[in-house]
Image (spheres, rainbow, N blue to C red):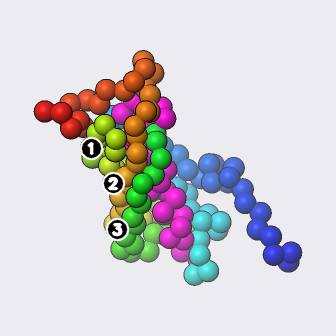
Amino acid sequence: MSGKVKLSPTKFTQAFRVTSATEGRVDFELDIQKEHTNRLQTIHGGTLASLVDLGGSLAVASSGRFATGVSTDLNVTYLSPGGRPGDLLKGTATLDKIGKTLAFTQVTFTNSKGQLAARGSHTKYVTGTMGEDGPFVAPAEFSDVD
């Protein structure tokens, strides 16, 4: 072995799919493959952290922002095994609040047994991001303004 690892983003995108998207919420699934696992053949914590990043960004995008800003904080808590190759991991990302500068999201994951496998939080700096019609104005339920 040469010591080089061949990465295949295509394999990830073929295994990942959004199943539902509404304003402030995105549901998604990942068909766990060998490339997503650790040496114990369970889903790698880094894979789940990447999905918190992706899911949080999708939740921000679901509010009408087409640039989703940059990450300022990301946290993952691992609660149960997420699964093995061939298992289906389900995720739900929600946009908890969006203000003038920051967006706050949460992502939860359930394994194929229906157990809560992990949960994460993702904060994004969103100043200057734009929607389809120019500068984005947050819906009242996500806004700092009363």
Quadrant position of residue 84? bottom right
> Is residue 15 highlighted in magenta?
no
Outermost residue, right side: 2
In the image, is residue 31 above or below residue 1? above
State yes or no: residue 61 in magenta. Answer: yes
Please state the horizontal and vertical placement of residue 136, each as a whole percent of the image. 37, 27
- Residue 126 got which mark? none
Q: Nearer the viewer, mark 2 or mark 1?
A: 1
Residue type at the position of mark 3: Gln
- Where disc 1 sits, the SS reads strand
Mark 1 or mark 3: name the one nearer the start of the chain: 1
Give the label on residue 115, or none. Answer: 3
Q: Tell which of 15 and 59 is nearer to you.
A: 59
Residue at the image position 27 percent from the left and 43 percent from the top: 97
> Where residue 110 sits: x, y (%)?
38, 62
Q: Position of residue 4 (x, y in %)?
A: 80, 70
Read off the residue under disc 1. Answer: 97
The residue tagged 2 is 106
- Count neighbours of disc 3 (C-alpha within 10 A) and say few if under 14, some if 14 to 19, many if 20 or more: few
**Magenta stretch bounds:** 41-67
As measured in the structure, the alpha-carbon distance from the residue carrying label 2 to the one carrying label 1 is 10 Å
